[in-house]
Image (cartoon, helix red, strand yellow):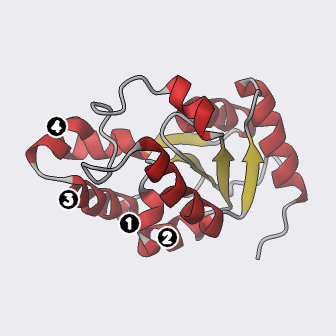
Amino acid sequence: MSETNHQSVILIGMPGAGKSTIGVLLAKELGLGFLDTDLSIQIREGKTLQVILDESDYLDLRRIEEEVLLETDCHGQVVATGGSAVYSEAAMAHLKSCGPVVYLDVPVEVLRRRIHNYDTRGIARRPDQSFAELFDERTALYRRHADLTVTCTDHLPGEVVDDIRTALATHTPK
């Protein structure tokens, strides 16, 4: 993927994987726009993800997320998705139509260190679901939807961006 190619890059992964941080840096490197879909949800709804969950439930948040993703013009963007985007087949098909989907693969123990606010972060999950259970459930979905997987263990954000750029340069669309 060259700097003049305006294809998008879609980032998926667990909360705490660094999608927003990496996305901003990658967008700058590639000369693309940046879109954080969690922020898009919050702007559209006029409330935080946690307030949406508090006022309804995780399935409602996932429904809203799907609507926002399907309405999103993802062309010419690095898109940092919410961690639950992969629950929607329709949304993922829409995002894949804009460019390759890159899974930021971070081990569960690293994510646990990064996420100190699991119960108040606005994560769309069953109320009784532990972080490890959520990780296992979503990891299968991330792997299924990913065109590319970038392992982020012990990498600084700039190194992850370099790894993504290298993977994109050798990626052949399916």
Question: How many angstroms separate mark 2 from mark 1 (CA)?
Answer: 6 Å
Q: Do the CB atoms of the residues marked 4 and 1 lie less than 8 Å apart?
A: no
Q: Secondary structure at mark 4?
A: helix
Dot 2 or dot 3, earlier in sequence: 3
Residue that appears at 84% across and 62% down: 171
Q: Do the CB atoms of the residues marked 2 and 1 lie less than 8 Å apart?
A: yes
Residue that appears at 43% across and 47% down: 82
Residue 91: percent from the left, percent from the top?
A: 43, 68
Residue that carries the numbered disc 1 in the rendered image: 70
Task: Please state, as top left, top right, bottom left or bottom right, where the C terminus lies in the image.
Answer: bottom right
Residue type marked 4: Val
Residue that carries the numbered disc 4 in the rendered image: 51
Q: Secondary structure at mark 3?
A: helix
Residue that carries the numbered disc 3 in the rendered image: 60
Residue that carries the numbered disc 2 in the rendered image: 94
Q: Secondary structure at mark 1?
A: helix
- Tell me if mark 3 has few (under 14), some (14-19) or many (20+) residues whose alpha carbon lies within 10 angstroms of its own: some
Dot 4 or dot 2, earlier in sequence: 4
Q: Secondary structure at mark 2?
A: helix
- Tell me if mark 1 has few (under 14), some (14-19) or many (20+) residues whose alpha carbon lies within 10 angstroms of its own: some
Whether 84 is drawn above or below 30: the answer is below
